[in-house]
Amino acid sequence: MPSSFTVIISQLLLNQLSDEIYPSIKDKLTQTSSIPALDVSVTWTIVKPPDFELGRDQSTSFILNVAIDLTVTPTGGSPTTTPLQTLATCDISISTDGKLGIAVSNLHFFTDDPFLKEILEAEKIAIISMLQEVLQTIEIPIGPVLDIEFTEYETEIQNGALIVGGSPSGGGGGGPAPRINRGFAISFSEPLMRTIVDDVWWESASKTIKSEGATIKLNKYQIYFKRNGFALQLGLTGSLEHSWGILGDAEWEIRFIGPVEADFQLMVDDDKIEVGHNTMVARLNAKMIPLDDLAMTEMLFAKLFLEDDLDDIVSSKIAKALLEKINGLYLFSVPPIDVSFSGINFSVTPANMQTQTDSDAFVLYGDATVTVD
Protein backbone atom coordinates (compact mmCIF):
# COMPACT_ATOMS: atom_id res chain seq x y z
CA MET A 1 0.00 0.00 0.00
CA PRO A 2 2.15 2.90 -1.27
CA SER A 3 0.98 5.75 0.96
CA SER A 4 3.16 8.69 1.96
CA PHE A 5 2.39 8.27 5.66
CA THR A 6 1.61 4.81 7.02
CA VAL A 7 0.67 3.48 10.45
CA ILE A 8 1.09 -0.27 11.03
CA ILE A 9 -0.43 -2.00 14.08
CA SER A 10 0.66 -5.56 14.73
CA GLN A 11 -1.67 -8.41 15.66
CA LEU A 12 0.42 -8.94 18.79
CA LEU A 13 -0.14 -5.35 19.94
CA LEU A 14 -3.90 -5.52 19.33
CA ASN A 15 -4.10 -8.69 21.41
CA GLN A 16 -1.87 -7.21 24.11
CA LEU A 17 -4.18 -4.20 24.39
CA SER A 18 -7.22 -6.49 24.38
CA ASP A 19 -5.71 -8.44 27.29
CA GLU A 20 -4.94 -5.26 29.23
CA ILE A 21 -8.33 -3.64 28.69
CA TYR A 22 -10.54 -6.71 29.22
CA PRO A 23 -10.34 -6.94 33.05
CA SER A 24 -11.71 -3.39 33.35
CA ILE A 25 -14.66 -3.90 31.00
CA LYS A 26 -15.52 -7.58 31.42
CA ASP A 27 -18.50 -6.82 33.66
CA LYS A 28 -19.98 -4.80 30.78
CA LEU A 29 -19.63 -7.63 28.26
CA THR A 30 -22.81 -9.48 29.19
CA GLN A 31 -26.49 -9.27 28.47
CA THR A 32 -29.67 -11.01 29.64
CA SER A 33 -32.88 -11.22 27.64
CA SER A 34 -36.04 -13.29 27.28
CA ILE A 35 -37.10 -15.21 24.20
CA PRO A 36 -40.86 -15.78 24.64
CA ALA A 37 -41.15 -17.87 21.50
CA LEU A 38 -38.75 -20.41 23.04
CA ASP A 39 -39.97 -19.93 26.62
CA VAL A 40 -36.46 -19.24 27.94
CA SER A 41 -34.32 -16.46 29.37
CA VAL A 42 -30.79 -16.18 28.03
CA THR A 43 -27.60 -14.67 29.41
CA TRP A 44 -24.50 -14.50 27.27
CA THR A 45 -21.12 -13.29 28.52
CA ILE A 46 -17.81 -12.71 26.75
CA VAL A 47 -15.52 -14.57 29.14
CA LYS A 48 -12.07 -13.95 27.64
CA PRO A 49 -10.33 -11.04 25.91
CA PRO A 50 -11.32 -11.08 22.21
CA ASP A 51 -8.43 -12.41 20.13
CA PHE A 52 -7.48 -10.74 16.84
CA GLU A 53 -6.45 -12.95 13.94
CA LEU A 54 -5.02 -10.86 11.11
CA GLY A 55 -4.25 -12.63 7.86
CA ARG A 56 -0.95 -12.70 5.99
CA ASP A 57 -2.42 -12.03 2.56
CA GLN A 58 -3.70 -8.63 1.51
CA SER A 59 -7.31 -8.21 2.59
CA THR A 60 -9.85 -5.79 4.04
CA SER A 61 -11.18 -8.18 6.69
CA PHE A 62 -9.95 -10.09 9.71
CA ILE A 63 -11.21 -12.61 12.26
CA LEU A 64 -12.02 -11.90 15.89
CA ASN A 65 -12.10 -14.99 18.13
CA VAL A 66 -14.67 -14.57 20.88
CA ALA A 67 -15.24 -16.95 23.80
CA ILE A 68 -18.85 -16.84 25.04
CA ASP A 69 -20.62 -18.55 27.91
CA LEU A 70 -24.29 -19.00 27.04
CA THR A 71 -26.64 -19.61 30.00
CA VAL A 72 -30.17 -20.77 29.14
CA THR A 73 -32.91 -20.90 31.77
CA PRO A 74 -36.25 -22.46 30.77
CA THR A 75 -39.30 -20.96 32.45
CA GLY A 76 -39.64 -22.78 35.79
CA GLY A 77 -36.43 -24.75 35.10
CA SER A 78 -32.77 -24.72 36.06
CA PRO A 79 -30.07 -22.83 34.13
CA THR A 80 -27.52 -24.62 31.99
CA THR A 81 -24.31 -22.96 30.79
CA THR A 82 -22.56 -23.86 27.54
CA PRO A 83 -19.16 -22.46 26.53
CA LEU A 84 -19.11 -21.48 22.87
CA GLN A 85 -16.32 -20.52 20.53
CA THR A 86 -17.40 -17.78 18.14
CA LEU A 87 -15.72 -16.32 15.07
CA ALA A 88 -16.59 -12.75 14.10
CA THR A 89 -15.71 -11.62 10.58
CA CYS A 90 -14.74 -7.94 10.69
CA ASP A 91 -14.42 -5.61 7.70
CA ILE A 92 -12.25 -2.50 7.70
CA SER A 93 -12.78 0.72 5.79
CA ILE A 94 -11.61 4.31 5.93
CA SER A 95 -13.57 7.51 5.45
CA THR A 96 -12.68 10.46 3.25
CA ASP A 97 -11.38 12.28 6.34
CA GLY A 98 -9.18 9.40 7.49
CA LYS A 99 -11.34 7.77 10.16
CA LEU A 100 -10.90 4.02 10.48
CA GLY A 101 -14.10 1.98 10.45
CA ILE A 102 -14.46 -1.63 11.63
CA ALA A 103 -17.75 -3.43 11.08
CA VAL A 104 -18.71 -6.94 12.21
CA SER A 105 -20.23 -8.49 9.09
CA ASN A 106 -20.87 -12.03 10.33
CA LEU A 107 -20.82 -14.31 13.37
CA HIS A 108 -20.22 -18.04 13.29
CA PHE A 109 -21.08 -20.07 16.42
CA PHE A 110 -19.45 -23.47 16.85
CA THR A 111 -22.32 -25.70 17.97
CA ASP A 112 -24.32 -28.57 16.47
CA ASP A 113 -27.19 -28.23 18.93
CA PRO A 114 -30.24 -27.06 16.93
CA PHE A 115 -31.89 -25.54 20.03
CA LEU A 116 -28.77 -23.49 20.86
CA LYS A 117 -28.51 -22.45 17.23
CA GLU A 118 -32.01 -21.06 17.40
CA ILE A 119 -31.22 -19.16 20.58
CA LEU A 120 -27.96 -17.78 19.17
CA GLU A 121 -29.68 -16.66 16.00
CA ALA A 122 -32.10 -14.66 18.15
CA GLU A 123 -29.19 -13.08 20.07
CA LYS A 124 -26.92 -12.54 17.09
CA ILE A 125 -27.71 -8.86 16.53
CA ALA A 126 -27.16 -8.04 20.22
CA ILE A 127 -23.76 -9.80 20.26
CA ILE A 128 -22.70 -8.03 17.05
CA SER A 129 -23.74 -4.71 18.57
CA MET A 130 -21.61 -5.36 21.65
CA LEU A 131 -18.56 -6.36 19.62
CA GLN A 132 -19.08 -3.34 17.37
CA GLU A 133 -19.00 -1.06 20.39
CA VAL A 134 -15.74 -2.66 21.56
CA LEU A 135 -14.10 -2.34 18.14
CA GLN A 136 -15.04 1.32 17.87
CA THR A 137 -12.50 2.04 20.61
CA ILE A 138 -9.72 1.34 18.07
CA GLU A 139 -8.53 4.73 16.82
CA ILE A 140 -5.51 5.27 14.60
CA PRO A 141 -4.53 8.92 14.02
CA ILE A 142 -3.28 9.65 10.49
CA GLY A 143 -1.26 12.84 10.78
CA PRO A 144 -1.18 15.73 10.83
CA VAL A 145 2.40 16.14 9.66
CA LEU A 146 3.25 19.84 9.96
CA ASP A 147 0.50 21.67 8.05
CA ILE A 148 0.29 19.06 5.29
CA GLU A 149 -3.26 17.86 4.73
CA PHE A 150 -3.90 14.29 3.68
CA THR A 151 -6.71 13.83 1.19
CA GLU A 152 -6.16 10.25 0.00
CA TYR A 153 -6.51 7.37 2.48
CA GLU A 154 -6.14 3.60 2.33
CA THR A 155 -6.41 0.69 4.74
CA GLU A 156 -5.73 -3.03 4.55
CA ILE A 157 -4.75 -6.14 6.45
CA GLN A 158 -1.44 -7.67 5.40
CA ASN A 159 1.42 -9.62 6.95
CA GLY A 160 -0.43 -9.99 10.24
CA ALA A 161 -0.93 -6.26 10.72
CA LEU A 162 -3.58 -3.56 10.40
CA ILE A 163 -2.29 -0.87 8.03
CA VAL A 164 -3.68 2.63 7.55
CA GLY A 165 -2.13 5.21 5.24
CA GLY A 166 -2.61 8.75 4.02
CA SER A 167 -1.14 10.92 1.26
CA PRO A 168 -1.39 14.56 0.23
CA SER A 169 -3.39 15.24 -2.92
CA GLY A 170 -1.32 13.97 -5.81
CA GLY A 171 1.54 13.26 -3.44
CA GLY A 172 1.23 9.55 -2.83
CA GLY A 173 3.97 7.05 -3.27
CA GLY A 174 6.41 5.08 -1.22
CA GLY A 175 7.56 1.55 -0.72
CA PRO A 176 5.59 -1.27 0.91
CA ALA A 177 4.70 -0.92 4.58
CA PRO A 178 7.44 -2.30 6.84
CA ARG A 179 6.79 -5.74 8.29
CA ILE A 180 6.50 -5.92 12.05
CA ASN A 181 5.95 -8.79 14.46
CA ARG A 182 5.09 -6.71 17.50
CA GLY A 183 4.20 -3.17 18.54
CA PHE A 184 3.50 -0.52 15.94
CA ALA A 185 5.36 1.34 13.23
CA ILE A 186 4.90 4.73 11.57
CA SER A 187 6.49 5.21 8.16
CA PHE A 188 7.35 8.50 6.42
CA SER A 189 8.04 7.98 2.71
CA GLU A 190 10.60 9.89 0.66
CA PRO A 191 7.82 11.74 -1.28
CA LEU A 192 6.36 12.97 2.01
CA MET A 193 9.73 14.22 3.24
CA ARG A 194 10.23 15.95 -0.10
CA THR A 195 6.85 17.68 0.31
CA ILE A 196 7.91 18.81 3.80
CA VAL A 197 11.24 20.20 2.56
CA ASP A 198 9.48 21.92 -0.35
CA ASP A 199 7.05 23.61 2.02
CA VAL A 200 9.48 24.75 4.69
CA TRP A 201 12.54 25.61 2.58
CA TRP A 202 12.67 25.10 -1.17
CA GLU A 203 9.65 27.14 -2.25
CA SER A 204 10.92 30.23 -0.43
CA ALA A 205 14.67 29.66 -0.82
CA SER A 206 16.80 32.12 -2.75
CA LYS A 207 17.84 30.36 -5.93
CA THR A 208 20.59 32.82 -6.91
CA ILE A 209 23.20 33.74 -4.31
CA LYS A 210 26.11 36.14 -4.83
CA SER A 211 29.29 36.91 -2.97
CA GLU A 212 31.79 39.36 -4.40
CA GLY A 213 32.34 38.13 -7.97
CA ALA A 214 30.88 34.66 -7.56
CA THR A 215 27.29 33.75 -8.40
CA ILE A 216 25.87 30.37 -7.42
CA LYS A 217 22.53 29.10 -8.66
CA LEU A 218 20.55 26.58 -6.65
CA ASN A 219 18.83 24.67 -9.47
CA LYS A 220 17.35 21.62 -7.73
CA TYR A 221 17.75 19.26 -4.86
CA GLN A 222 17.28 15.58 -4.23
CA ILE A 223 16.41 13.95 -0.94
CA TYR A 224 17.35 10.49 0.21
CA PHE A 225 17.33 8.65 3.51
CA LYS A 226 20.50 7.57 5.21
CA ARG A 227 21.37 6.16 8.61
CA ASN A 228 19.44 7.99 11.36
CA GLY A 229 18.19 10.70 9.05
CA PHE A 230 18.19 12.11 5.56
CA ALA A 231 20.36 14.14 3.22
CA LEU A 232 19.63 16.92 0.76
CA GLN A 233 21.81 16.74 -2.31
CA LEU A 234 22.03 20.19 -3.85
CA GLY A 235 22.23 20.80 -7.60
CA LEU A 236 24.50 23.84 -7.94
CA THR A 237 25.98 25.70 -10.88
CA GLY A 238 27.87 28.97 -10.86
CA SER A 239 30.18 31.51 -12.35
CA LEU A 240 32.97 33.81 -11.21
CA GLU A 241 33.80 37.22 -12.62
CA HIS A 242 36.78 39.42 -11.74
CA SER A 243 38.02 42.71 -13.05
CA TRP A 244 41.75 43.00 -13.70
CA GLY A 245 41.73 46.73 -14.30
CA ILE A 246 43.20 47.77 -17.62
CA LEU A 247 43.57 44.11 -18.59
CA GLY A 248 39.78 43.73 -18.62
CA ASP A 249 37.34 41.32 -17.04
CA ALA A 250 37.75 37.58 -16.74
CA GLU A 251 34.96 35.03 -16.35
CA TRP A 252 34.91 31.40 -15.29
CA GLU A 253 32.25 28.72 -15.14
CA ILE A 254 32.13 26.88 -11.82
CA ARG A 255 31.46 23.16 -12.02
CA PHE A 256 30.90 21.25 -8.82
CA ILE A 257 32.61 17.89 -8.64
CA GLY A 258 30.77 15.36 -6.55
CA PRO A 259 27.70 16.01 -4.41
CA VAL A 260 27.14 19.00 -2.20
CA GLU A 261 25.02 17.67 0.66
CA ALA A 262 23.35 18.80 3.82
CA ASP A 263 22.84 15.99 6.33
CA PHE A 264 20.09 15.94 8.97
CA GLN A 265 19.25 13.60 11.82
CA LEU A 266 15.74 12.42 12.65
CA MET A 267 15.11 11.69 16.30
CA VAL A 268 12.40 11.08 18.88
CA ASP A 269 12.13 13.58 21.71
CA ASP A 270 9.48 12.43 24.19
CA ASP A 271 6.55 11.69 21.86
CA LYS A 272 7.68 14.00 19.05
CA ILE A 273 9.58 13.29 15.85
CA GLU A 274 11.99 16.13 15.14
CA VAL A 275 14.81 17.03 12.79
CA GLY A 276 17.99 16.94 14.82
CA HIS A 277 20.58 19.66 15.21
CA ASN A 278 23.66 17.85 13.92
CA THR A 279 23.95 19.28 10.42
CA MET A 280 26.92 19.28 8.08
CA VAL A 281 27.45 20.60 4.58
CA ALA A 282 29.77 18.31 2.69
CA ARG A 283 33.24 19.52 1.70
CA LEU A 284 33.11 21.52 -1.50
CA ASN A 285 35.01 20.45 -4.56
CA ALA A 286 34.66 22.68 -7.61
CA LYS A 287 36.38 22.99 -10.96
CA MET A 288 36.86 26.28 -12.78
CA ILE A 289 36.42 26.46 -16.54
CA PRO A 290 37.89 29.65 -18.08
CA LEU A 291 35.56 31.35 -20.54
CA ASP A 292 38.08 33.80 -22.05
CA ASP A 293 41.82 34.20 -22.59
CA LEU A 294 42.32 36.42 -19.56
CA ALA A 295 40.54 33.88 -17.38
CA MET A 296 42.90 31.22 -18.73
CA THR A 297 45.91 33.33 -17.78
CA GLU A 298 44.74 34.21 -14.28
CA MET A 299 43.62 30.75 -13.11
CA LEU A 300 45.83 30.68 -10.01
CA PHE A 301 44.54 33.97 -8.65
CA ALA A 302 40.96 33.05 -9.50
CA LYS A 303 41.16 29.89 -7.43
CA LEU A 304 42.05 31.97 -4.39
CA PHE A 305 39.01 34.18 -4.91
CA LEU A 306 36.80 31.17 -5.55
CA GLU A 307 37.70 29.34 -2.36
CA ASP A 308 36.62 32.25 -0.16
CA ASP A 309 33.51 33.04 -2.23
CA LEU A 310 32.28 29.44 -2.32
CA ASP A 311 32.77 29.06 1.41
CA ASP A 312 30.76 32.25 1.98
CA ILE A 313 27.91 31.26 -0.35
CA VAL A 314 27.52 27.54 0.27
CA SER A 315 28.88 26.95 3.76
CA SER A 316 27.41 30.15 5.17
CA LYS A 317 24.47 31.52 3.21
CA ILE A 318 22.88 28.33 1.84
CA ALA A 319 23.68 26.29 4.95
CA LYS A 320 22.36 29.04 7.22
CA ALA A 321 19.03 29.10 5.37
CA LEU A 322 18.73 25.33 5.67
CA LEU A 323 19.52 25.44 9.38
CA GLU A 324 16.97 28.16 10.04
CA LYS A 325 14.19 26.35 8.18
CA ILE A 326 14.81 22.66 8.92
CA ASN A 327 16.89 22.23 12.08
CA GLY A 328 14.66 21.59 15.08
CA LEU A 329 11.63 21.11 12.83
CA TYR A 330 8.83 19.28 14.64
CA LEU A 331 7.27 16.78 12.21
CA PHE A 332 4.77 14.66 14.09
CA SER A 333 3.57 13.75 17.55
CA VAL A 334 2.54 10.30 18.75
CA PRO A 335 0.18 11.29 21.55
CA PRO A 336 -1.79 9.06 23.93
CA ILE A 337 -5.15 7.98 22.51
CA ASP A 338 -8.01 8.50 24.97
CA VAL A 339 -11.07 6.31 24.41
CA SER A 340 -14.13 5.23 26.33
CA PHE A 341 -16.24 2.08 26.51
CA SER A 342 -19.53 1.96 28.36
CA GLY A 343 -18.50 4.75 30.74
CA ILE A 344 -15.00 3.37 31.37
CA ASN A 345 -12.17 5.63 30.20
CA PHE A 346 -8.71 4.45 29.30
CA SER A 347 -5.64 5.85 27.58
CA VAL A 348 -3.33 4.05 25.14
CA THR A 349 0.16 5.53 25.48
CA PRO A 350 3.11 4.93 23.10
CA ALA A 351 6.30 3.60 24.65
CA ASN A 352 9.85 2.47 23.77
CA MET A 353 9.96 4.43 20.51
CA GLN A 354 12.99 4.03 18.26
CA THR A 355 13.82 5.23 14.75
CA GLN A 356 15.25 3.50 11.72
CA THR A 357 15.81 4.57 8.13
CA ASP A 358 16.14 2.57 4.94
CA SER A 359 16.44 3.53 1.29
CA ASP A 360 12.90 4.85 0.84
CA ALA A 361 11.42 5.53 4.27
CA PHE A 362 11.98 6.78 7.77
CA VAL A 363 10.28 4.47 10.27
CA LEU A 364 9.36 4.94 13.92
CA TYR A 365 8.89 1.73 15.91
CA GLY A 366 7.25 1.47 19.32
CA ASP A 367 5.02 -0.36 21.78
CA ALA A 368 2.01 0.83 23.76
CA THR A 369 0.56 0.50 27.23
CA VAL A 370 -2.94 1.02 28.63
CA THR A 371 -3.93 3.09 31.62
CA VAL A 372 -7.50 2.78 32.91
CA ASP A 373 -9.03 5.76 34.72
Image (cartoon, grey):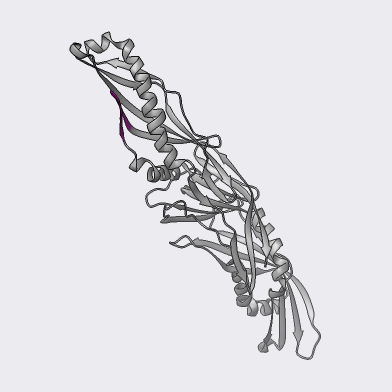
Instruction: State the image quarter where residue 136 is shown.
Output: bottom right
Point out the residue furthest to the bottom here.
Answer: 76
* Residue 208 is a magenta residue: yes
Left or right: 103 as drawn, with respect to 345: left
Query: Is residue 316 or residue 30 the one in the foreground?
Result: 316
Point out the residue furthest to the front here.
Answer: 245
Location of residue 162 with respect to 259 vertically, above or below: below
Residue occupying the point 53% across, 61% down? 92
Q: Which residues are magenta?
A: 207-218
* Residue 143 is a magenta residue: no
Residue occupying the point 41% across, 35% down? 320
Left or right: 59 as drawn, with respect to 216: right
Q: Where does residue 296 sit, x and y in percent of width and height?
A: 27, 10
Left or right: 126 as drawn, with respect to 202: right
Point out the residue furthest to the right here.
Answer: 78
Q: Where does residue 87 sit, x and y in percent of width and height?
A: 65, 65
Query: Is residue 301 or residue 322 the one in the foreground?
Result: 301
Left or right: 44 as drawn, with respect to 186: right
Q: Main secondary structure of the magenta part?
A: strand
Q: Where does residue 70 sit, x and y in percent of width and height?
A: 73, 76
Residue occupying the point 36% across, 30% down? 235
